[in-house]
Amino acid sequence: MNRSTVYVIVFIFYILSCLGISAWVKHREQRKDREGFLLGDRSIGPWPIAFSFVATLVSSSLFMGSGPKIYQQGWSFAIYGMMFMTIGVILSWVVYARPLSNLTDKLGALTITDLLAYRYNSKGIRSFSSLATIIIYIPLMGSQLVAAGKLFQTAFGLPYWAGIVIVGVVLTVATALGGFKSVVYNDFFQGIIMYGIFLILVPVMLVKAGGFSAVNAVIAKEAPEMFAAVTPKFPPLMIVSWFVYLVIGLGLGQPSLLVRYLACKDEQVIKRAFPLAVTCHAFGCTSIALVMTSAFVLFPGITDRETVFPTIVGNVFPPVLGGLALCAVFACMMSTVDSQLLVASSCFSEDIYKGVFKKDATERQVYNAGVISTIVIGIGGILTALYSGLGVLDLIILAESCLIPIYLFSVCGCTHFKRLNAAGVLSGMITGAITAFVWELKFGWDLVVPVFPAVVVCAAMTFAVSYMTKAPDAVVVNTFFGDGTKDELIAYNSRH
């Protein structure tokens, strides 16, 4: 039996396991109502929450995009990536975990856009953030499925389109079956695979390459620029823009991550999940850096970064372990896409279907709308991957650069900035997203990562317009930052 056939068999078992988890959740655990589908009844423990947070954050880019950039650019990229992203994880939990969990408990909010609706009482903010999230998450999901197609092509010897369609369909079905709880428990399972492979792969790669010191000696001799803190590819302004993207943007502006805090039942879950999430993330970043720098020594000259990891697997592992290693890539991919898919479908079911088209919709109708929209949006992600023609990292950066300005200051206004108002937040959302898109089309990454100018413009507009217009009324501020009640806020919002 050849290697590709073994890979396919292992992958089939992996896929069946994912579907089995979703079916089990649907049968045993999941209530068929909005809170059950969107937040898993807020009954999930710290280990699944922590693993789900990290698995959603890293995505297939760890193996097929940003990870292989370490192969090309060395420790100069690895250090910034590991350090900045880990700081971003810490910042996110410190800034948002308790406030968002407490607000969810106080207001009964089920989505981030629910919180925005309570805070700003603006149809414009709710509609724009929901529609933009759906539109942006479709190419973000597509970026992960592009990685699936390339992995199928290079490792399995199967057609590119087959990987996109198979993985896309499985993800859509698994998410539609069990909602948030299915997503989290699948992420937990996938995190076990990913970290288990790292525990094997890192020592194997280092031993084959002659050890950590030998790897660095070869890099210092053949590519000394890979140790430089500032290089032509990483001038100071570019480093600042990566800091904004990886620390502030990903940490504070990603709804698929922030929704994990809404699902935390209480502070005990947060206290236990926080150090787990930080440790798991740091371990994953360090592991991929060691693997990719070792690969530079063992397999020099690979030009297509999206084939680096399949090359490592094919030459280092026996077929069965190699198949499991490739499943680790799919694990990262699937844990990101299912979270994005759930957030996008919740935007439709909660904010568009119930918020606009059928305000008197029952719990069951909203639940059904969530399931149907999950399927439709999943199909959109598959079509984007098939026809976009962009690489994994290109799609990720473009989409996230447009998404981050929409949620960065709007959510901070719910938890930290009392003075922000609807006019300022909406103007910042729109101008920030447009800036990111236009910057990507005109300049690309020649000067900075597109999210940097987007965040600068968004911040300037949000605070300038907020301070030039009327401050939020005391009822709103007291509800979010004091002891005001949900009933008082609802009564106030209904009058305005």
Image (cartoon, grey):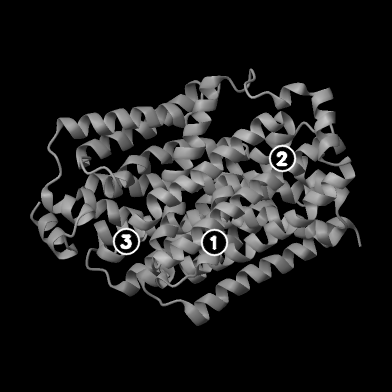
Residue 169 in the image: state x and y as whole percent. Answer: 59, 60
At 87% from the left edge and 41% from the top edge, which residue is drawn? 209
Residue 324 is drawn in which quadrant? Answer: bottom right
Residue 137: percent from the left, percent from the top?
47, 47
Mark found first going from the N terminus, 2 or 1: 1
**Frontmost residue, 7 versus 165:** 7
Q: Residue at x 49, y 28 (%)?
A: 241
**Mark 3, other Cα within 10 Å: few <14 / some 14–19 / many ≥20:** some
Amino acid at the residue labelled 2: Glu
Q: Residue furthest left?
A: 495
Marks 3 and 1: which is nearer the front? 3
Q: CA distance from mark 2 to mark 1?
A: 24 Å
Q: Mark 3 falls on what kind of element?
A: helix
**CB of mark 2 within 8 Å of CB of mark 1?**
no
Query: Percent x, y for residue 451?
Result: 46, 32
Give the total number of marks visible in the rendering: 3
Question: Which type of secondary structure does the marked residue at label 2 adopt?
Answer: helix
273 w.r.t. 88: above or below: below
Task: Give the residue displayed 36% in from the left and 32% down from the top.
Answer: 432
Q: Nearer the viewer, residue 334 or 51?
A: 51
Residue kind at label 3, given as amino acid type: Asn
Q: Residue at x 64, y 52 (%)?
A: 164
The residue wearing badge 2 is 306
Which of the numbered marks, if any, corresponds to residue 102? 3
Is residue 83 shown left or right of residue 14? left
Q: Nearer the viewer, mark 2 or mark 1?
A: 2
Side (left or right) of 143 relative to 292: left
Circle 1 is placed at which residue position? 172
- Find the distance from the CA under tag 3 to the CA under tag 1: 31 Å
Instruction: Name the secondary structure under disc 1.
Output: helix
331 left or right, relative to 408: right
Disc 1 residue type (three-letter): Thr
